[in-house]
Amino acid sequence: MKIVLAGIIARYPFGGVTWCSLMYLLGLRGLGHEVLYIEDTGECIYDPERDEISTDPGYGTRYIHQALDPFGLGDRWSFVNYDGSYHGLSRDAVRAFCADADLFVNLSGGSWFWRDEYASIPRRVFIDSDPVFTQLAIAKGEPWYVDFFKGFDRLFTFGTNIGTPACDVPTSDLTWSPTRQPVVTELWKTEAPPTRDRFTTVMTWKTESFTDVDGNKDREFVAYIDLPTLSPSRFEIAVNGPMDLLASHGWSPVEAMAVSRSLWDYRDFIQGSKAEFGVAKHAYVSRRSGWFSDRTECYLAAGRPALVQDTGWTAHLPSGTGLIGFSNLDEAVEGLSRIECDYAVHAARAEEIALEYFDVSRVLPPFLEEALG
């Protein structure tokens, strides 16, 4: 089967975003399918060397190539700049691939266009990695936005509770099917012990998208800001937020870009960590979306336990050993203590959970079955 995957690697050239698309590409290829990566958002790229949104796609296109080439995908991508120019594969080459492609997968808005070559692919699906925000934006009724989503045969979301009685987010007349980020677990597995005795995470304090929805991590994190004073555990947070504030409360913040500049930097940071401590976006928590982080999946695959905020995911995934959910400060303190007291058991269980629930061999076959159904 020939599959086109649209992603946002160049628009957001950070390690975590890169792995999100890459593991779909590698997982689908590993199942025997031919894949092509396309990026066609109509937006300019973010250039971290200049720290600005740039009309020059040079950084983004180099970044895509450097990310995909080590995996034999260096000639399997095309980036469409805001001005309509093609980089990597030409438009003719993209059209030729799409002409007999079987499935178009739009991951996280990797394309906001229904070009003829995409629309002609027999099956078209969207994967929503930002639940609640996506559904609330659709509910506003902006015609072009509603029509865009109606162009898909199937809509998938990382919010397991979206469209169920457990979550009150409006879904209009659209049906969202739950799915999880697939992880190529063998790329994360490590026999090396953690190099830092720290609970870590990589996070964005407040995003620039969906600015009219008050639901970012800054609102949730303040409830846990005193956690380092209540536990002997140590923390290191890679964040683009208020460094001085976090440092004053004992979080040992580092610049997020320092650990996210490439997919390898990102993986090294996670593999070198003792465990993850993660807070979710307020919108995910307050709406009980069931969202679960693709970043946390990577910690688990690396054999690193995860203590992460419950968004409703505990109804669908095991919580207690290796992976622990919390809903308040007391539960977070208790979770830290449990991991510290029996670390080897939690680390082993973390890896088992990754294999059982998130490995590409578990996630992609049912996803494809529903996408093609």
Image (tube, helix red, strand yellow):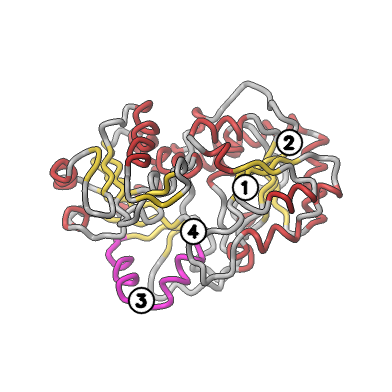
Whichever of labels 4 and 3 marks the residue nearer the N terminus, that label is 4
Which numbered disc, 2 or 3, marks the residue that appears first in the sequence? 3
The residue lying toward the viewer, choosing from 233 and 251, is: 251
Amino acid at circle 3:
Glu
What's drawn in magenta, residue-wise?
131-153
Q: Which mark is residue 239?
A: 1
| In the image, residue 357 above or below residue 185 | below
Q: Is residue 206 visible?
A: yes
Q: Amino acid at mark 1?
A: Val
Q: In screen coordinates, is 247 left or right of 353?
A: right
Compared to residue 278, the image places residue 143 above or below, namely: below
- Lower position in the chain sequence, tag 2 or tag 1: 2
Is residue 360 magenta-colored?
Answer: no
Label 2 sits on a secondary structure element that is: loop
Q: Compare marks 2 and 4 and give the one earlier in the sequence.
A: 4
Of pointers 4 and 1, the one earlier in the residue sequence: 4
Report the residue at 50% width, 30% height from top. 264
Q: Is residue 154 above or below residue 189?
A: below
Q: Is residue 138 left or right of residue 242?
A: left
**Please, what is the three-letter code of the amino acid marked with disc 2?**
Arg
Residue in the picture at 44% in, 43% down: 13
Tell me, for residue 130, which label it has, or none: 4
Q: Nearer the viewer, residue 211 or 367?
A: 211
Q: Which residue is mark 3?
A: 142
CA separation, marks 2 and 3? 45 Å
Q: Residues within 10 Å of mark 1 (few under 14, many from 20)?
A: many
Q: Which residue is mark 2?
A: 198
Q: CA distance from mark 4 to mark 3?
A: 18 Å
Q: Residue furthest bottom?
A: 141
